[in-house]
Amino acid sequence: DQAPVLTIDGPGGAGKGTISRLVAERLGWHLLDSGALYRLTALAATKHDVALDDEPAVAAIAETLDVVFLAENGEARVLLEGEDATRTIRTEQVGDAASRVASLPAVREALLKRQRDFRQAPGLVADGRDMGTVVFVEAPLKIFLTASAEERARRRQRQLREAGVDASLSSLLKEIQARDARDMQRSVAPLVPAEDAVELDTTSLTIPEVVDRLTELLARRG
Ligand code: C5P
């Protein structure tokens, strides 16, 4: 009787964000960008001068996070405590802070219910690191999306260039590898494919190819 969930987990830069949004649009399903919740928690902690390793204090912030997700004219925006945080949460600095607060068990626990509340009819596409292993363990279809670190660095560079930011490939590659290591080695909810996940390497696939593949898989699993 619960709405169906498609979980899409994987390392940063594998294309999860774009793919999840397009699949959700095609299906007319809701979208959970769980990384945004960790980014918003980190940003709120910084705003309130809370140290990123102060577990109870950061967990309290996660618990009471005042966020509103908006979709206006097909454009997604997010408000943190009433202020537009859409762009701020996408910076490398906030991404790095997010992966730090994400290693705190009490913070992950505090965000669990908020994430599960996104599961509503007609269905949910859940994008993250532990959607299939922790948050939606009973999801009928779980995808683990990967791409080589080099390809992810190239994609990130292209994205930044479009935003008018210049970054060297080698520094981006280093950041990606450091983030991967932290996400995979943490003791709570480490980044690993769920046992029943379908792994899809997107290194040499285009975005429409991946979207097609996922909607086909979903139709087959029914
Ligand atoms: O996916 P995104 O880059 O926005 O996520 C930011 C950080 O939040 C990740 O590096 C990861 O440490 C953390 N995260 C997580 N669990 C999730 C989603 C994100 O630990 N489900």
Image: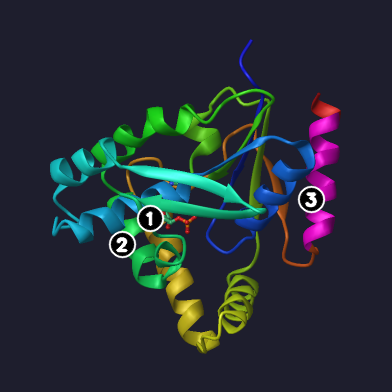
Image coords of residue 112 (percent x, y): 38, 31
Circle nearer the N terminus (1, 3): 1
Residue 136's label in the rendered image is none
| Mark 1 close to ligand 1, CB under 8 Å | yes
Looking at the rendered image, the quarter that the N terminus falls into is top right
Asked if the magenta segment contains residue 71, the reply would be: no
Range covered by the magenta-colored residues: 207-219
Q: Residue at x 43, y 74 (%)?
A: 175
Q: Which residue is mark 1?
A: 39
Label 1, label 3: how far apart the Cα atoms are = 25 Å
Q: Give the label, 1 or 2, closer to the camera.
A: 1
Q: Is residue 216 magenta?
A: yes
- Classify 10 Å Cα crowding around label 3: few (below 14), some (14-19), many (20 and above): some
Q: Which residue is mark 3?
A: 211
- The quadrant in which residue 156 appears is bottom right
Quadrant assignment for the C terminus: top right
In-front residue for pair 208/164 = 164
Q: Are marks 3 and 2 in contact (CB under 8 Å)?
A: no
Residue where numbered disc 2 is placed: 97
Some atom of ligand 1 lies within 8 Å of the CB belonging to the residue at label 2:
no
Image position of 173 (left or right of 186): right
Give yes or no for contact between labels 1 and 3 (Cβ–Cβ under 8 Å).
Answer: no
Three-letter code for the amino acid on which mark 1 is drawn: Arg
Q: Amino acid at mark 2?
A: Ala
x, y (%) of residue 179? 42, 64
Disc 3/disc 2 C-alpha distance (Å): 30 Å
Verify CB contact (< 8 Å) between mark 1 and mark 2: yes
Q: Nearer the viewer, mark 1 or mark 3?
A: 1
Judged from the image, the secondary structure of the residue bearing numbered disc 2 is helix
Q: Residue at x 40, y 52 (%)?
A: 79
| Other-residue count near label 1 (Cα within 10 Å), few / some / many at <14 / 14–19 / ≥20 | many
